[in-house]
Amino acid sequence: MLVPCFCLSQMKTGTFSELEIQQKENPKPIIIHIYTSWCSVCKIESFQLNKDKDLVHLITENFYLINFDPEKMKEKISFQGKEFNYLPNGNSGIHELALALSKNKNQPVYPLWIVLDKDLNLVEYHEGFFKAEKMKEKLNAVLNF
């Protein structure tokens, strides 16, 4: 018998438009998680990270987290003083911001984690599966910097 587990914590997420206001009121480091709905690695990773209560608490208390699906987000985004748009390509497309943040300018690797300090300087760039223990180690280093 399978019993769904409703005890998993969920990380509190925000949007790019909220970020500007939040950074003015209470500056914190920022985590931008770039993923897609079709990425099976992204789904497994999300499940693994969300079940680590210490990690969820660390992120919720100390960072602003933005989950960003660049294939679904079609609105214009203002970030770091620039505007980015969705680039349609037939039935699909990608958001310019994902390409701007990615080291691979043709197609980002999913999942992609970008960690910025409270002054919006890049402090961590991680392509692919991010294990909870390694993420906690990296995020604690950002807080202790």
Image: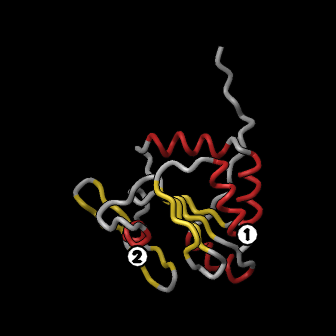
Give above or below for 108 relative to 77. above
Under circle 1, the secondary element is: helix
How is this picture coloured?
Answer: secondary structure
Along the line of sight, which residue is nearer the eye, 79 or 57? 57
**How many neighbours does mark 1 have within 10 angstroms: few (below 14), some (14-19), or many (20 or more)?**
some
For marks 2 and 1 on the same chain, the one whose residue lies earlier in the sequence: 2
Percent x, y of residue 8: 71, 39
Percent x, y of residue 24: 69, 83
For the N terminus, the image quarter is top right
Q: Which numbered disc, 2 or 1, marks the residue closer to the eye?
A: 1
Q: Residue at x 42, y 71 (%)?
A: 97
Q: Residue at x 60, y 40 (%)?
A: 47
Given contact means CB atoms under 8 Å apart, are the residues at marks 2 and 1 in contact? Answer: no
Q: Separation of disc 2 and disc 1 at Cα?
A: 29 Å
Along the line of sight, which residue is nearer the eye, 76 or 139? 139
Residue 143 - label: 1
Along the line of sight, which residue is nearer the eye, 92 or 143? 143
Residue 84 - label: 2
Q: Tell me if 17 is positioned left or right of 108 in this view.
A: right
Percent x, y of residue 16: 55, 71
Q: Residue at x 63, y 62 (%)?
A: 65
